[in-house]
Image: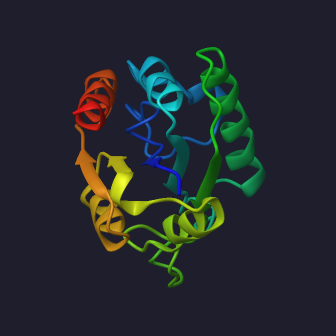
Amino acid sequence: MRKAIFIDRDGTINSDAGHYYIYRTEDFKLNPGVGEGLKLLQDAGFLIVVITNQGGVAKGEYTISDVEKVHLEMRNQLKKFGVSLTEIYYCPHHSDIQRCLCRKPGNLNIEKAISRFRIDRTQSYMIGDSERDMQAGQKSKLRCIKISTNADLLPVCQEILDEHRA
């Protein structure tokens, strides 16, 4: 069994300041400490799995192609820190339009990753900036850490490492 960090995208990995939706590569900016923190966790044996709602697709604000371009940009920016994401799971639905199980606070995407990568829930975490992120992580019985939107991620990553060393 493997340990993993499940992490929200907008507001956690990248800044969403000044934008309701991030769907253009030029608007994608990593938050402070993200590259350094995720590298420390990856080096400690954690898989890094992004779990993100992208409801703007269902609302017609942007396309799946736009989401995939932003995800490629995210991978490229993280690669500069030596971080390789294990996988990115996103929900293109929106609760105003259709119901689904993959949109957080639903946990279907987390459960898919747990099964696919044989993840040990007891050693894994959900990091996000919203109550919705915490609810999804709790449903999957993960340790949950809520951060302030667009906060420096490095202290949280250090905290996780310290907990695992103890």
- Quadrant where the image shows the C terminus: top left
Q: How many marks?
A: 0
Left or right, residue 22 beside residue 117: left
Q: Residue at x 51, y 36 (%)?
A: 45
Residue 6 image point, x, y percent: 45, 50
Q: Residue at x 68, y 48 (%)?
A: 67
Type of colouring: rainbow
Q: Residue at x 52, y 52 (%)?
A: 2
Eyeballing the image, is 132 above or below 88?
below
Eyeballing the image, is 129 above or below 108?
above
Eyeballing the image, is 18 above or below 105?
above
Residue 31 image point, x, y percent: 41, 24
Eyeballing the image, is 85 above or below 80?
below
Q: Residue at x 44, y 71 (%)?
A: 107
**In the image as oriented, which residue stretches furthest toward the bottom?**
99
Identify the image quadrant of residue 109: bottom right
Residue 81 image point, x, y percent: 58, 15
Pick the residue in front: 79 or 114: 114
Residue 117 image point, x, y percent: 62, 59
Left or right, residue 52 beside residue 127: right
